[in-house]
Amino acid sequence: MLILLGQHPLFARSDGKGGTLYYYYYDTITWVAGGLALAWLIWYLVSRYRRARALRRPTRRSDYKLLKQVVQLKSELSSRYLRPGVSNNIHAVGIGMLRGTNEYCIQVFFNDPNAEMWADPAAAPLPGSYRGVPVIPIEMAAAGFLSAADSRSGSAQYPNGIRDHQEVIVGGISGANTNLTGQSGTIGYFCTRKSRLPRRKEVHLLSNSHVFADLRKAKVDDGDLIMQPSPGEAGSNRPIGTLVNFFALKFDDISEPNHVDAAIARLWGPERHDPLIPLIGAVKGYVEKGDVEIGEAVRKFGRTTGYTEGRVFSIYLDIWIRYDRTGQSAFFQDQFLIEPALPEFAKFVSKGDSGSLVVDASQHAIGLIFAGTSDAVKRAPASVNAKSSATIDPTADQPARIEGYGLARLRIELVVWQV
């Protein structure tokens, strides 16, 4: 105790009377301060852990080991089939599940059943299985980013989309970067970010990079304002926030895949907001990437189509997506593909819905819509449901077909949703 709690001289000075004053520091103070700092650190880490656990949807999956093996096989086929020059028809590879079973399958998505599958006519045909995992071909139109270049897009068929001026900002309404002339997107939801001032949090808006940023620029500048409604809308708009940061997308390069298309913008103080999504409500938390289930019901509210429901069709999807604004294509890895819930909803998304937040049945966020196709399902609902659900029938005479789908992904666990 004498060693641990001893005193040590710091310095000495004259007292002005011929004597000397000595100053000491005590180990007791050091240990008490260290103990308090350690206690605070433990409290901080535990509170953050408990808060993260409270926001995260409880896991439902028990087959992580099996799924990990299938993901590895999917990645091998993806790197083979999606490499430039191999096929002008195949544009995505993902993981689904066979109808009526709990057996995973690898889904290979192609554009045209009447076109050549491979650039080399002598190439081997698509295998029926790969290392014991069924390989299922699925006809699907190529995906594109869903920012709209026409303010009238979907207005007649989907009257519930919110494209006009809103006094109170909520999730799911029209909003985009002021530099995207003629374009429209969706403000997905809100997140918070601690400011430099103590006990103060700044509210931020969440959407896609290609909605909140001009991807032709490498970094944020003073001209990156967020307009509500979007610059492409017919009505008057005004700035409501400033772009803070965005994920810069990489184009035409499979060796450096994109994983996230997301951006945040600081909502200006005078603007009123309400943390909810029309017809959905407030977000309660998030779902980790590995816990999203094939076939589970999801929903979203977007600027164009308003409220729609769908099902997770494919997980860990690797896909090429075209960006019309630059004419380039971006390769995305490990995304979610969502099909519309037929027959109530002919399509899950349309142009202008980019940035919409996808949630599960219990208000947990799964990801942000950033791409898809606007083509509605043209077949009879019963026929499409039989061949185009998340559980594929491998005995069907014709390849399955999926239309009106959306793509979503975001590292939700990095965002604090409660504001």
Image (tube, rainbow, N blue to C red):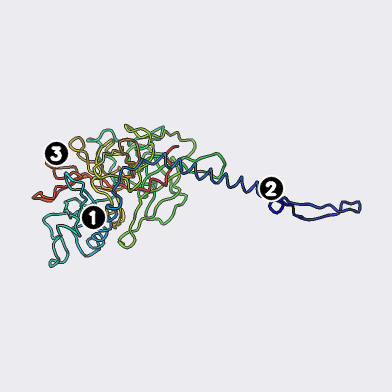
- Give the amino acid at mark 1: Val
Q: Which residue is mark 3?
A: 381
Q: Are marks 3 and 1 in contact (CB under 8 Å)?
A: no
**Secondary structure under badge 1?**
strand
Q: Position of residue 141 (x, y in %)?
A: 19, 51
Q: Which residue is mark 2?
A: 29
- Give the amino acid at mark 3: Pro
**Secondary structure under badge 2?**
helix
- Give the amino acid at mark 2: Ile
Nearer the observer, 45 or 178: 45
Q: Are marks 1 and 2 in contact (CB under 8 Å)?
A: no
Which image quadrant: the C terminus?
A: top left
N-term mark: 2 or 3: 2
Could you tell me which residue is drawn at 61 percent across and 46 percent down? 35
Q: Which residue is mark 1?
A: 93
Nearer the observer, 303 or 178: 303
